[in-house]
Structure formats: structure tokens, C-alpha cells
């Protein structure tokens, strides 16, 4: 298959970036999107041009390291898929493909398609944990967790922290990411003691990091490679409201 | 040098308790004066960093990813073992210990394995308290499944994402310590050297992958939780970034490397489809519970699988191993697949694949039944191959998955360099020659939460705070070596990419040091690897600048280390003329083609020490004794 790529190239955080056109010829339909970029990069190197920088690691959809806007869709158009799991057979021969980094104030571009997502770590640092010391835990079965709660908590806990929700959101809000962690911990009994404090602190940290507010567009859920439901945002709002009242 | 494993006295079930009592403690008020450097933020590195920080030590944690939540522990699917016996099916610490020693083909250290089984239960408690959403029964109790052929149900799991949930648990504990400023994270930092002063590890040298800055960091102890070296084969189930650099740099600074030839090849992966394939995807081996593995009877039979009648199919595992059938252990299943492909009976375009057929299972359970059990795996397979496994048999082939070898450590997890520790997959200690399913997560967390935080205290209590800081000559020396190596990589000005060398190396390793190894092939590899390495240093091309994000440069540095390390793997495989676990020497097999151990000559750990550039490393041995689990030949007939 042959493709025309329009790729965002930006030398550094303070440099100006622009779209550069590359031809990707003779690509097997079994190639994954990132493997297609590997091939383009090998050919650039051969020609003496610096390869395109992009983040990736596990290449099986779980580490959350990869992700770009592909034709305006976070991780590409295929639902429930990270970029590394997208295959070129999902495109048409001869397609022109636009590849850009996540765009959000809180995710500054490091180089080309690589962005800095440390703002996500800052949100977790604010309260995305249960405060317990190693060795202080009671027996695992001493804390029964209803199956339904455990399953729902797992639905939220699946978040891979890739940032697609932020990139897809017109407000660049991190509500889906933040709500996934707040819901995961808020749904299990172990997470109850810190539930209110957590909701307040994490949302404050989110705002401080420069993410926008949620106006219920729902783009986040549509873009999420793990298909995390925006119902969790409602749960976050409820916890946060309660926290304000308690205060 | 005599390798002293420092095994505590007493009966095996009391060793760890006695040792914990005998170890010196650091006065709580003094802990804050100590500074520990942890490299890696996977299960082992993150859990160790968090726990050391809780105890009061200052921790600096370095890793190459942009967040500690991304380390490759996250990709583990199946589960984590523990001897809880919640199912009341006869499990116990002793049974988990016994199974692990036997599964490791009698090449692990009994006291280490016993301790692992002992602390396994505390890991589950710890993770539950952190909020890890393990699967539950309707009554709210923890659910278990049986895994990897174990006869008891001792595996705890969180859907098919157990590694992810455990890593996120350790990550949350770590971030809590970041919040209280006990841990400082160094994202996108790669460790490029260990600094040893007066025979003791005093710190590391790193490269900031965003700015290119080379910098020294001094500490009172250095802990490597830097994972395995499966990517020496280029194609593996490891993440693309996994590398041997930190461990290999430690080796070059005096840490012994143990059993590098013990590599685990997992039987159920999606086969390679083309030259540009960048990694292999594992599918949970639970698929073998219901799928039947077969190849055509006739070599070169290219008919579509559904056109091949029953009478012309060879269900070779069921034929060769009537009692275990498709459920034989990983190493046996992998070798059998290779054997039929070598006979020209492999399937798929490349001929490197076997069928895993669910036709009978669908007839038995209905498509809905199969979907309920394996739906997510079938979907993953469909996405990658564009073939519908409900209609056409899956194609699978073995792939490199885990490395049992690693830096040699004593009972305290300390390497042969005082003050330098190795934890998780980076060390060699607990799995012998073959790791059992659901044991990798257990070992990573055991080391990080429950072993290292104690043993490192004993070392620190004995050794006053380091007075050596990063201005010491040894750091300057090391920094300048790191810089000149980078300059060298940048200035070769050849024509080939680091990846092209990596692929070439991987092919040699897979062909000569993969699922089956023999003397002639290994000697051939020892000729080819230096040739590739030589071309690498003459014909590599790295563009861009070293002072910015430069992924080609990162890759080049890692491939350069793989090109040296690969030789160590091959040498170890050559010296060990027996077959054991994941290491199969064709010269050492029974009449019907099964692995044949040679306990008289090889019941030992082989630990290699660096002898200088261009010199052959020296092989040392640590004898293994089995007081509790008596070695026997494994049989699955």
C-alpha cells in the first residue's frame, strides 16, 4: 500500500513546528501504524534526514506510552484501540494521513510527536492512592468487596494514562482520566476514608496543571482506547460536591 | 572468587525469620541521612522505592519512560501466585515452594524460593489494601484460578490485566511518597554507568533523554530493578524499550552475571508476519485449556486449515504426551512446535506457526461459551491478524518472553559489588532454569516490598553514610567515558540504522541460541556476533544532536550493549552441555527427545565475571544443594 503522510515536525518545545509531507510507499497491510512509522524512519535515516520522534513502548496497547492524532482522531479512527494496535489495513491505498501530537496546554510538545504528560503524574500525586504502609495490611479476605463494586472499579482502573481523552476534548480537560482514578478508589471499601479529600485534591491539581473544565462533549469516551465510560465523570462530580458540603 | 550466597542457618522455614532478627537496624532518626538510588520503576523498582521511602530513606528513582506507570510489568496478563489456600484445595507455602523448585528444573536456590513462597501471602494482602481490583466471588471474597498446569488454584487475577493493576498499585504507593517528598522521580533518564569507589557502589551516571545532559548521582546504595534482557533476540514479547544496558554496565563494573542462557520461550504468541514486525504479542496460555494444537501430517501442505480432513491432521502434543496433551509446560510445548516446523509442517505464509483450533471447544461449549471465556483474546487476535478465530484456527508460534538469568545476587539480593542490589527480573535468583506462570509478578513484588527493604538496612547499618559525593574523581572519570562513547556513536557516519543491526543480531540469537541449541550452532554464533559488532562500530548511522531527544542515539547505545551481552549468553549456553528448563541442548536428550539434565556436572549456578574488553569472561560456579525437593526427571507422558 502507498500513503502520503503529513507529519508534525517540531525540533523542541520552544521551536516552531510545521507539517512535513512524506511518501510511504510499499507498506504491507499487515504492518501496524507504528511499524509503518518505523519503516518511514529507516528510510529517512538512509536519506540522511533525522527520523520522526514518537513515543511508544509495549506495542500491545497497555503501557499508554504511544498516541498521536491521526486524521484528527486520537489513536486513529478505530474504536477501542491504541495507536500501536491500529493496522494499515484499516486505511485505503493512496490515503493521505495527517499525524500530529496531542494538543493541550498541559501537554507541551517535547519534540515532533512526543509530548510531556507529567501533568497526569501530578494529578495522581495529589491523592490518587490509598494511604497505607507496606506490611500493615489485614488479610486479603478480611475486606470483602462485592463483585459488582470490584467489577466497576476494574472498569475504571483500566485507564492506561495515555492522554487521548485530553487530546480529544475541545476543552483539553482531564476529567475522564481524573474521574477514572477517583472512581476506581471510591468504589472499593479500602478507598472510603480518603474519598472526599481525594476528590477535592485531585480536581484541584487537575485545574492547577492547566487542563480545561468538562462541558459534557463526550469526545473523551469516544476516543478512549479502553472505552472508559464518562459516567465516571458524574461520579467524580458527586464526590466533589459532597466534599464541598462536608467541608 | 568464592560466591557466598550468605544463606542463613537453621531449617528452611525459619531461615528468613531468623535472618530478619539478626540483621542490624538503622536507627529511625538516622534513616533520613541515607540516600538510596533506585533504577527502574516496574513492579520491583516502584515497590522498593515506595517501601524504602516509607521507612524514612531518601530515594531517587530513575527510569527511561515518561511516567513510572509504564514499565513493562504492566503487560503481564495472567495473574500472581500466592499460597493463601483460600480454595481449601491443599495449597501451602511448602507446596508453592516445591512446585517452584521443580518447575525451575532444579536449578534455583531452595532458601530463596522458600522465602518467596513465604512472603507471597503478604503481597496479596498488601495489594488488596492498596485498592487493587482483584477478581471477586459473589460473596465478596477473592477469586482464584488454576494457571500454567498447577494442580491447585492459587492464582489471583484482575481480568487479563493483572500486571497492569499491580503496577498501578505500586505506582500509587510510589506517588504517595513523591507527594511527601521522600522520593524524587527522574523521568526519561537512562542509567549509563554504575560508579564504584573503593569496591563499593556509590552512585550512577545518567543521560537525560530530553536534554542530553550527562550527570552523576551519588548515594549510599544503588538498586537495579531494570528488568530482563529478552530483547537481545530483537523480537520478543518485551516492550521495545526493554534493554540490558543497566545490568550490563553493572557487569562491566564487577557484578557477576548468572545463568544468562536461561531464557523462557512462551508457546502461545501470534506468529511473525513480515520483516518489519517490531514485536511479538503474547496470548494467555489459558487458551491451551480448550484449544487443540495441530499441524498437517504432510510437509508442505498449503491447503487452508478447514480443507484439511481430520485424518490428515497431527495433534502432535496429544500424540506425544497423552497424559498432559496440550497442557504440557511452556518449554516442552515450545520445543515441540519448533520440531514440527523444522519438519516442514509449519503453517502460515512463513511456515513458522502451528494451529490452535477451537472447533471442538465451540461444538462443546457453543460459540457463546467460548466467547465468554476467551472473548478478549479472540478479539485481540482478530485485530492483529484480520482472521476470525471462531471460523479459522488461530496460528501460534513460540516467542521469547522472560529471562530467568540475571545479575548474581546473594540471599540479601546484593550483587558481587557491595552496595549494589538487583531485584525483580534483573536478578537471577528464584526461577531456576524455567519460570512458572504467574510467578514473575510475585517475585518482583516480593523483592521490592518485603525483602530488599530489610536487607538493605542491614548493609546501611554496617556501613556509615557515604562521604563520597558526585564530585569524586571516579564520577568524573565515568562521566567522561560515557560522553566519549556517545561521541563515538554519533561520529561513525556509516549507512546503517541501529535497528538493522539489532534485527541481524536477533536472527543469529534466535537461530543458534533459541529454542534448541547445539555445539556447532553456538560456535557459529560466537563467530557471527563479533562480525556484526565490528560492522556496527564501523557502519552505524546516527543523525541529529546528542543534546536533545534523540531516539536513534538511545537505540544505538542499547544495541551496542546487546551486541556484547549476546556473546555472554551464547558462551553460557555453550558451557552448559546439559538440557534444563528453557535451555535445551540437542546433545543432551533422552531417546524420545526429551530434555536430559546432568545433575552430576551442572547442579550449579554459573556466574560470569567481566575480564576486560576483548577478553573472555570468567565462569564461576555456586553449587546448588537440594535438601527438601529431591531432583527427578520431569515427565509429562
Image (cartoon, coloured by chain):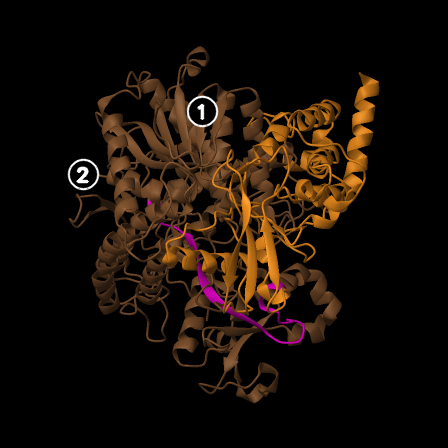
Chain colours: A orange, B brown
Per the image, the residue denoted by label 1 is B59
Dot 1, how many residues are within 10 Å of its Cα: few (below 14), some (14-19), or many (20+)? many
Toward the viewer: B193 or B319? Answer: B193
Check the residue under mark 2 and report the chain it is in: B
* Residue B152 x %, y %: 58, 53
Residue at left offset 56%, top offset 19%: B180
* Residue B595 x %, y %: 35, 66
Q: Is residue B412 above or below residue A39?
A: above
Q: Seen from this angle, which residue lies furthest left?
A: B615
Q: Secondary structure at mark 1?
A: strand
Q: Which mark is residue B119?
A: none
Toward the viewer: B155 or B229? Answer: B229
* Residue A31 x %, y %: 53, 64
Any magenta on residue B351?
no
Any magenta on residue B401?
yes
Per the image, the residue denoted by label 2 is B1
Identify the magenta region: B382-406
Q: Is residue B596 above or below residue B484?
A: below
Residue B380 visible somewhere in the drawing:
yes
Amino acid at each position: 500500500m502507498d500513503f502520503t503522510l503529513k507529519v508534525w515536525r517540531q525540533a523542541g518545545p520552544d521551536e516552531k513546528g510545521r507539517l512535513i509531507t512524506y511518501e510511504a510507499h510499499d507498506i504491507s497491510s499487515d504492518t501496524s501504524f507504528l511499524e509503518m512509522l518505523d519503516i518511514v524512519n529507516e528510510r529517512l535515516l538512509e536519506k540522511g534526514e533525522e527520523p520522526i520522534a514518537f513515543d511508544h513502548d509495549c506495542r500491545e496497547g497497555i503501557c499508554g506510552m504511544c498516541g498521536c492524532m491521526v486524521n484528527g482522531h486520537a489513536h486513529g479512527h478505530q474504536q477501542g484501540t491504541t495507536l500501536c494496535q491500529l493496522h494499515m489495513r484499516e486505511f485505503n491505498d493512496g490515503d493521505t494521513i495527517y499525524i500530529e501530537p496531542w494538543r493541550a496546554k498541559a501537554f507541551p510538545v517535547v519534540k515532533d510527536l512526543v509530548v510531556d504528560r507529567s501533568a497526569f503524574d501530578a494529578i495522581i500525586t495529589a491523592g490518587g492512592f490509598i494511604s497505607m504502609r507496606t506490611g500493615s495490611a489485614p488479610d486479603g479476605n478480611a475486606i470483602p468487596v462485592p463483585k459488582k463494586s470490584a467489577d466497576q472499579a476494574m472498569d475504571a482502573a483500566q485507564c492506561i494514562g495515555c492522554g487521548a481523552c485530553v487530546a480529544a476534548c475541545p476543552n483539553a480537560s482531564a476529567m475522564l482520566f481524573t474521574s477514572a482514578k477517583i472512581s476506581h478508589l471510591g468504589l472499593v471499601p479500602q478507598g472510603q476514608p480518603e474519598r472526599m479529600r481525594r476528590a477535592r485534591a485531585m480536581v484541584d491539581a487537575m485545574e492547577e496543571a492547566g487542563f480545561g473544565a468538562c462541558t459534557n462533549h463526550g469526545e473523551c469516551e469516544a476516543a478512549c482506547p479502553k472505552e472508559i465510560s464518562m459516567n465516571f465523570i458524574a461520579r467524580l462530580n458527586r464526590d466533589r460536591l459532597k466534599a464541598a458540603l462536608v467541608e | 572468587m568464592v560466591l557466598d550466597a550468605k544463606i542463613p542457618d537453621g531449617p528452611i522455614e525459619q531461615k528468613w525469620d531468623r535472618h530478619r532478627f539478626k540483621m542490624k537496624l538503622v536507627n529511625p532518626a538516622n534513616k533520613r541521612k541515607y540516600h538510596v538510588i533506585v533504577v527502574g520503576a516496574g513492579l520491583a523498582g516502584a515497590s522498593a522505592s515506595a517501601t524504602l521511602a516509607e521507612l524514612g530513606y531518601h530515594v531517587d528513582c530513575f527510569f527511561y519512560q515518561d511516567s513510572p506507570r509504564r514499565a513493562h510489568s504492566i503487560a503481564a496478563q495472567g495473574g500472581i501466585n500466592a499460597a493463601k489456600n483460600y480454595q481449601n484445595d491443599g495449597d501451602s507455602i511448602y507446596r508453592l515452594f516445591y512446585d517452584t523448585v521443580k518447575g525451575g528444573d532444579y536449578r534455583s536456590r531452595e532458601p530463596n524460593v522458600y522465602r518467596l513462597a513465604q512472603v507471597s501471602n503478604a503481597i496479596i494482602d498488601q495489594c488488596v489494601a492498596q485498592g487493587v481490583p482483584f477478581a471477586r466471588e459473589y460473596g465478596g471474597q477473592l477469586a482464584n484460578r488454576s494457571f500454567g498446569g498447577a494442580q491447585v488454584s492459587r492464582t489471583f487475577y484482575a481480568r487479563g490485566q493483572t500486571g497492569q493493576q499491580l503496577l498501578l498499585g505500586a505506582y500509587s504507593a510510589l506517588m504517595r511518597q513523591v507527594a511527601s517528598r521522600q522520593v524524587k522521580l527522574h523521568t526519561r533518564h537512562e542509567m549509563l554507568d554504575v560508579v564504584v569507589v573503593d569496591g563499593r557502589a556509590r552512585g550512577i551516571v545518567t543521560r537525560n533523554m530530553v536534554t542530553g545532559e550527562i550527570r552523576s548521582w551519588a548515594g549510599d546504595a544503588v538498586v537495579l530493578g531494570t528488568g530482563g534482557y529478552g530483547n537481545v533476540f530483537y523480537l520478543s514479547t518485551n516492550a521495545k524499550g526493554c534493554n540490558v544496558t543497566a545490568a550490563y554496565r553493572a557487569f562491566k563494573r564487577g557484578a557477576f552475571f548468572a545463568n544468562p542462557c536461561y531464557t523462557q520461550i512462551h508457546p502461545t504468541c501470534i506468529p511473525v508476519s513480515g520483516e518489519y514486525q517490531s514485536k511479538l504479542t503474547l496470548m494467555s496460555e489459558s487458551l491451551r485449556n480448550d484449544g487443540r494444537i495441530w499441524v498437517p501430517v504432510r510437509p508442505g501442505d498449503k491447503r487452508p486449515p478447514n480443507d484439511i480432513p481430520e485424518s490428515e491432521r497431527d495433534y502432535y502434543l496429544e500424540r506425544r504426551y497423552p497424559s498432559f496433551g496440550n497442557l504440557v509446560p511452556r518449554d516442552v510445548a515450545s520445543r515441540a512446535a519448533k520440531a514440527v516446523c523444522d519438519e516442514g509442517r509449519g503453517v502460515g505464509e512463513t511456515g513458522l506457526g502451528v494451529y490452535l483450533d477451537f472447533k471442538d471447544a465451540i461444538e462443546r461449549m457453543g460459540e457463546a461459551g467460548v466467547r465468554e471465556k476467551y472473548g478478549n483474546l479472540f478479539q485481540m487476535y482478530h485485530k492483529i491478524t484480520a482472521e476470525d478465530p471462531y471460523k479459522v484456527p488461530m496460528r501460534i508460534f513460540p516467542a521469547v518472553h522472560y529471562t530467568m538469568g540475571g545479575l548474581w545476587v546473594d540471599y540479601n539480593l546484593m550483587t558481587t559489588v557491595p552496595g549494589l542490589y538487583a531485584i525483580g527480573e534483573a536478578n537471577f535468583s528464584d526461577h531456576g532454569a524455567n519460570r512458572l506462570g504467574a510467578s514473575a509478578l510475585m517475585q518482583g513484588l516480593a523483592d521490592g516490598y518485603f525483602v530488599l527493604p530489610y536487607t538493605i538496612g542491614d548493609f546501611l547499618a554496617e556501613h556509615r553514610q557515604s562521604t563520597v559525593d558526585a564530585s569524586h574523581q571516579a564520577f568524573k572519570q565515568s562521566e567522561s567515558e560515557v560522553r566519549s562513547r556517545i561521541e563515538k556513536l554519533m561520529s561513525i557516519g556509516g549507512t546503517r540504522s541501529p535497528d538493522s543491526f539489532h534485527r541481524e543480531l536477533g536472527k543469529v540469537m534466535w537461530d543458534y541460541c533459541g529454542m534448541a541449541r547445539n555445539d556447532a550452532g553456538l560456535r557459529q554464533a560466537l563467530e557471527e556476533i563479533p562480525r556484526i559488532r565490528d560492522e556496527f562500530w564501523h557502519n552505524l548511522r546516527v543523525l541529529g544532536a546528542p543534546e536533545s531527544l534523540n531516539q536513534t542515539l538511545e537505540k544505538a547505545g542499547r544495541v551496542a550493549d546487546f551486541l556484547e551481552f549476546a556473546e555472554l549468553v551464547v558462551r553460557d549456553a555453550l558451557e552448559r552441555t546439559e538440557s534444563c528448563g528453557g535451555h535445551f541442548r540437542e546433545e543432551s536428550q533422552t531417546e524420545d527427545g526429551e530434555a536430559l539434565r546432568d545433575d552430576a556436572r551442572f547442579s550449579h549456578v554459573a556466574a560470569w565475571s567481566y575480564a576486560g574488553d576483548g577478553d573472555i569472561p570468567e565462569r564461576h560456579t555456586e553449587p546448588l544443594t537440594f535438601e527438601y525437593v529431591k531432583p527427578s526427571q520431569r515427565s509429562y507422558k
